[in-house]
Amino acid sequence: MNQGPADPEKRRSSVEWPTIVDDRLRLLVDLTQQADDLDKSTSANELLAALICSQSLDGARLARLVKRYRNRPLTKIAEETEEYGGAPPPRRGRPRSGSQRDGVGKSTR
């Protein structure tokens, strides 16, 4: 079973973006987990790492992506997120164990 890249060094990153973008990220994580193609649940960190590592190392292409994001109204991103049922509520703390989809390990708070 592939556990992903083995890297003993970790770096904490602090990213600040609009709440609408964070909502979209939570939706993407939820959709990934619903796909049922993973042998265990994923996280926003793992999804972002996968997206980053899958990008072409083409500066011009990346610049076009940034321009497209900058020119896109946040209301359009919010509308698209809502079309898929909206973002799941933010999780608080780490899941203890088990799958988040079947409710095992969820806090009752």
Image: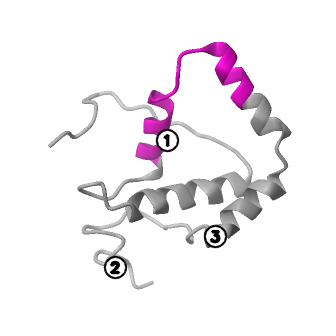
Front: mark 3 or 2: 3
Residue 55, magenta (yes or no) = yes
In the image, which disc is placed on residue 48? 1
Sequence-first disc among 3 and 1: 1
Report if the CB atoms under discs 2 and 1 are less than 8 Å apart: no
Find residue 18 and report its horizontal and vertical position in percent: 74, 51
What residue do we see at 34% from left, 79% from top?
A: 103
**Label 3 crowd bin: few (<14), some (14–19), many (20+), radius 10 Å:** some
Image vertical order of residue 51 relative to residue 8, above or below: below
Report if the CB atoms under discs 3 and 2 are less than 8 Å apart: no
Q: Amino acid at mark 2?
A: Gly
The CA distance from mark 2 to mark 1 is 24 Å
In the image, which disc is placed on residue 29? none
- Front-lying residue, 103 or 7: 103
**Segment tinted magenta in the rendering:** 45-65
- Front-lying residue, 7 or 46: 46
Mark 3 residue element: loop
Q: Quadrant of residue 63?
A: top right
Instruction: Report the residue marked by disc 3.
Output: 86
What residue do we see at 76% from left, 38% from top?
A: 69
- Front-lying residue, 91 or 80: 80
Find residue 48 and report its horizontal and vertical position in percent: 49, 41
In the image, which disc is placed on residue 103? 2
What residue do we see at 85% from left, 38% from top?
A: 71
- Front-lying residue, 1 or 16: 1
Q: Residue furthest bottom?
A: 108
Left or right of 106, for residue 70: right
Q: Quadrant of residue 5?
A: top left
**Label 1 crowd bin: few (<14), some (14–19), many (20+), radius 10 Å:** some
Q: Amino acid at mark 1?
A: Leu
The CA distance from mark 3 to mark 2 is 19 Å
